[in-house]
Amino acid sequence: MRYHTAVFSCILFALLWPGPTESAQWTCATCKGITERFAEKYAETEKGGYGGGNTDWEETYLKEYRRSEVRLLEIIEQLCKHDNHACHALVEEHEELLEEWWQKDESPHDNLYKWLCIDHVKTCCPNNTWGPGCRDCPIGREKVCSGHGKCDGEGTREGTGACTCDKGYQGALCEQCSIGHYEEYKNTTHVSCKGCHYGCNITCKGPGLEGCLACHKGYNYVQGQGCIDVDECQRETPAPCPQGFYCTNIVGAHKCFKCNEACDECFGPEANECKKCRENHVLLEGECKECDPLCKGCKGVGPENCVKCDEGKLADMVDGVCIECAPACHGCTGPGPENCKRCRMGFKQNKQGVCEDVDECKTICRLQHEVCTNTIGSYDCECEEGYERNVRDACVMKIPGQEDKPKRSQFDKYMKPNKHPKKMLTGKLRVEL
């Protein structure tokens, strides 16, 4: 059954593919691929797909099957992929050669490639030869291309036979070092080339920076010493790194790293490696210390070293020390509301000179259905429960489903909703906002 299937496949194959032509040309790669796959399939069919039971019968059968036409056809059927037309055409044209070789009872691993591709189909050449006549590849220093290149078309009937040199080598026989390389070793039969140091600008006469004849950027050439690394971090103008970063020199270049968060300028990553401190810090023994919270700039730690007091912290300077003023004070001569220089809005000075809270609810929120709540330094004016403010700022009965309007404070009465600049009234003084 298997024999009939194989024969039918070969007949079908012959009908589907065009006949050979005398002008057909095959590449060495196609032919070599066929011989390699032949060896693979030869190994796969070694047992012939039979097994089990009658050992004597199997041994007798396998001896007959080993070099049978059935096995050959099974192998040939699997040599080419479906879409590899060149492979199919080559096998079809030279199937008789495969059959002739098959009868020689030789291993495909040993000489099928030479028999088929070199001697008969003539698409390949022996090693170290090239071209239609399989000419010898160029020999230099007793090796093909001096052992540092490949012969163009080597092993095929194609190519130019010229040497294609490995990296670092040049010349017709790859016997010279290319630009950017130097001769590490050389005698009558061998040359060894090594790349120049990356600090060299293309040319060198030996290893390392001392072997350079010219230098890349980041190096200076010194006669007798070669290329010497430039320390860019010592450059003042232009600065090697942006503000807030410090410079680290590396061979041929430099890198910038971020300073500690306390530093504005530095020479290292730690807080004690600052050159200049960021705002509201002071440099003490190489370390940036944060100023006292009451300071606006300082010359040391503590409120006694403030350059200026932070008004946003309600601080004022008394005898060279920043103190925290009472919330009622606008500037002070000491702690507490009795030491205010003047009172803040919402406070007033009593007969004892103490800034105390003004109860605005005695004189404000007098509209119908308004309720006033006094707060320290201010007040809240809102509508009674069940009422809300309308566009005229009056409290009217709340319409179900609408949200409450916001409360009014003492500052709202100074904000006029018109097209003119808004003004705040403080006593007799009008202040533009």
Image (cartoon, helix red, strand yellow):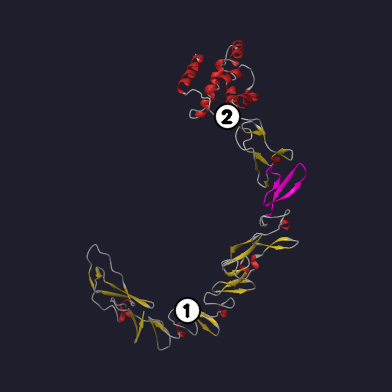
Task: Tell me if 404 is positioned left or right of 272 in this view.
Answer: left
Task: Confirm whether the magenta stretch covers residue 347.
Answer: no
- Please name the amino acid that badge 2 sits on: Gly
For this view, does 296 lie left or right of residue 275? Answer: left
User: On the picture, is 306 further left or further right than 128?
Assistant: left
Towards the viewer: 91 or 136: 136
Mark 2 surroundings within 10 Å by alpha-carbon count, few (fewer than 14), some (14 through 19), many (20 or more)? some
Of the image marks 2 and 1, the number of the one nearer the N terminus: 2
On screen, residue 127 above or below 411: above
Indicate which disc residue 33 carries: 2
Residue 272 placement: quadrant? bottom right
- The numbered mark at residue 194 is none
Q: Secondary structure at mark 1?
A: helix
| Circle nearer the viewer, 2 or 1 | 2
Q: Position of residue 144 (x, y in %)?
A: 69, 38
Rendered image: mark on residue 311: 1
Are the residues flagged by discs 2 and 1 in contact, CB closer than 8 Å?
A: no
Residue beneath the point at 48% across and 21% down: 13
- Stretch in magenta: 172-197
Quarter of the image with the C terminus in it:
bottom left
Q: Position of residue 287 (x, y in %)?
A: 62, 71
Residue placed most toward the observer, 88 or 161:
161
Q: Amino acid at mark 1?
A: Glu
Distance from disc 2 to disc 1, alpha carbons, whole Å, reads: 88 Å
Location of residue 345 in the rendering, given as x and y in whole percent from the top left corner:
38, 81
Residue 299: image x %, image y %?
Answer: 59, 78
